[in-house]
């Protein structure tokens, strides 16, 4: 919901404050120059000064302290439009200052609320004009003086700059929010690693790169041994801590270009580019030993071990799914042969023996 005390409502109020302060402050000169030749009563001058100098700050405090800041600020924008229409009629529709004031307020409504707020603003301006004509009478002042032209110049130059700066800052914030949302959509909330879908997408890209550029790469599937027993014995809070600990160890052991993800549950997945099977095996053995040596003084009986399946890219692989399936078979073999070990398929074992003879 937009109307809230700590989120978008207050942000909206703060965003409007600067353009209103600058716009009404410099717009005061335009109105004074246009109204002065008409010799209005004293109360008009007092109202003019209050509207130009005091109202921006009163409006800000009024909306900021409101239970619904967003709605309160929209009300303030309608009062701005009402006053704009009032001053347009009070200056007897002097073309240059009148168009300057009303167009700048309409620009503000467009930036703040789009079409709906523009329509409401136009109705408020019309109401302001009717109010002014009923109090001050009607008339037309169609020839602006040189003083009135010069008085409008600050409004025509400074106010668009202020509004543009606010819109630029908003665009920067939106881009940052978009970047954060994109990152959140690609990561696992518990571990901070890539989620299943994002990792699979990157696996496809790596597979295509290996095929086109003939570069080596290894994928690894990692399973925490007896993770269900850990959850059942120590509770799910400890289980989550184990998952976070493994993700932390992965970051410590991997290079910047290596891609780690949470495949699901207690299973993790890695893409190790520009790596052969022997190098991957050494890295995974180091990880397995590091995790196996983890001890928690508060849980002395807690032990963590890993079963790891490796699969190196080969030109015979028909698809990323086949590559992943080979790693899954190697993981299954590691678990079937007693767990707490690194394993790979028979064909890769032979290739490894040739590359790294005893």
Image (tube, rainbow, N blue to C red):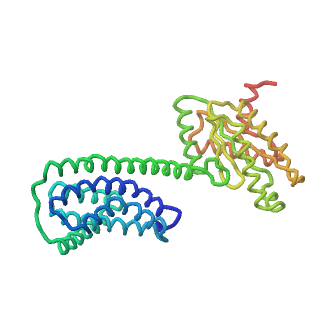
Residue 233 appears at what percent x and percent y?
84, 61
Q: Along the horizontal axis of the image, is 26 left or right of 356?
A: left
The part of the image, by quadrant, that contains residue 292 is top right
| Depth check, front residue: 205 or 19 | 19
Residue at (23% x, 64% y) in the render: 87
- Quarter of the image containing the C terminus? top right
Residue furthest out toward the bottom: 134
- State the residue lying farthest toward the right: 300
Q: Nearer the viewer, residue 103 or 115?
A: 103
- Number of on-image labels: 0
What is the residue that sits farthest to the front in this orientation?
42
**Is 317 placed above or below 174 here?**
above
Q: Quadrant of residue 13?
A: bottom left
Q: Position of residue 264 (x, y in %)?
A: 66, 54
Q: Quadrant of residue 351?
A: top right
As displayed, is residue 265 above or below residue 158?
below
Against 207, residue 233 (above or below) is below
Where in the figure is residue 293, as x and y percent of width and height?
A: 85, 43
Q: In the image, what residue occupies the spot 41% across and 61% down?
A: 57
**Image check: 65 left or right of 237?**
left
Task: Specify whether 252 is left or right of 80.
Answer: right
Picture coordinates of residue 85 (x, y %)? 23, 66
Q: Residue at x 32, y 61 (%)?
A: 114
| Front residue of 103 and 27 | 27
Residue 276 or 117: which is nearer the viewer? 117
């Amino acid at each position: 919901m937009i109307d809230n005390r700590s989120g978008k409502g207050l942000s909206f109020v703060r965003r409007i404050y600067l353009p209103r302060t600058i716009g009404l402050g410099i717009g005061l000169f335009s109105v004074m120059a246009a109204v002065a030749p008409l010799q209005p009563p004293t109360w008009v001058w007092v109202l003019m000064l209050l509207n130009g100098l005091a109202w921006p700050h009163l409006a800000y405090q009024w909306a900021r302290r409101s239970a619904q800041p967003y709605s309160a600020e929209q009300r303030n924008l309608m009062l701005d439009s009402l006053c704009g229409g009032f001053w347009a009629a009070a200056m007897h529709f002097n073309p240059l200052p009148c168009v300057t004031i009303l167009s700048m307020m309409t620009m503000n409504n467009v930036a703040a609320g789009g079409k709906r707020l523009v329509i409401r603003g136009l109705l408020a301006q019309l109401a302001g004009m009717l109010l002014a004509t009923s109090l001050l009478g009607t008339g037309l002042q169609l020839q602006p003086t040189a003083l009135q032209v010069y008085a409008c110049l600050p409004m025509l130059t400074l106010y668009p700059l202020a509004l543009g700066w606010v819109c630029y800052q908003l665009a920067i914030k939106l881009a940052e929010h978009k970047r954060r949302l994109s990152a959140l959509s690609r990561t696992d909330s518990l571990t901070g690693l890539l989620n299943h879908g994002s990792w699979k997408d990157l696996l496809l890209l790596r597979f295509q790169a290996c095929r086109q550029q003939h570069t080596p790469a290894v994928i690894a599937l990692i399973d925490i041994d007896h993770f269900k027993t850990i959850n059942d014995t120590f509770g799910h809070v400890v289980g989550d801590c184990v998952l976070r600990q493994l993700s932390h160890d992965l970051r410590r052991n991997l290079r910047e270009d290596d891609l780690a993800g949470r495949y699901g549950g207690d299973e993790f997945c890695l893409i190790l580019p520009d790596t052969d099977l022997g190098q991957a095996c050494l890295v995974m053995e180091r990880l397995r030993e590091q995790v196996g040596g983890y001890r928690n003084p508060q849980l002395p009986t807690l032990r963590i071990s890993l079963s790891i399946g490796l699969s190196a890219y080969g030109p015979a692989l028909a698809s990323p799914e086949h590559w992943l399936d080979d790693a899954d078979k190697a993981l299954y073999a590691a678990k079937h042969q007693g767990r707490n070990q690194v394993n790979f398929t028979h064909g890769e074992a032979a290739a490894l023996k040739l590359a790294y003879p005893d």
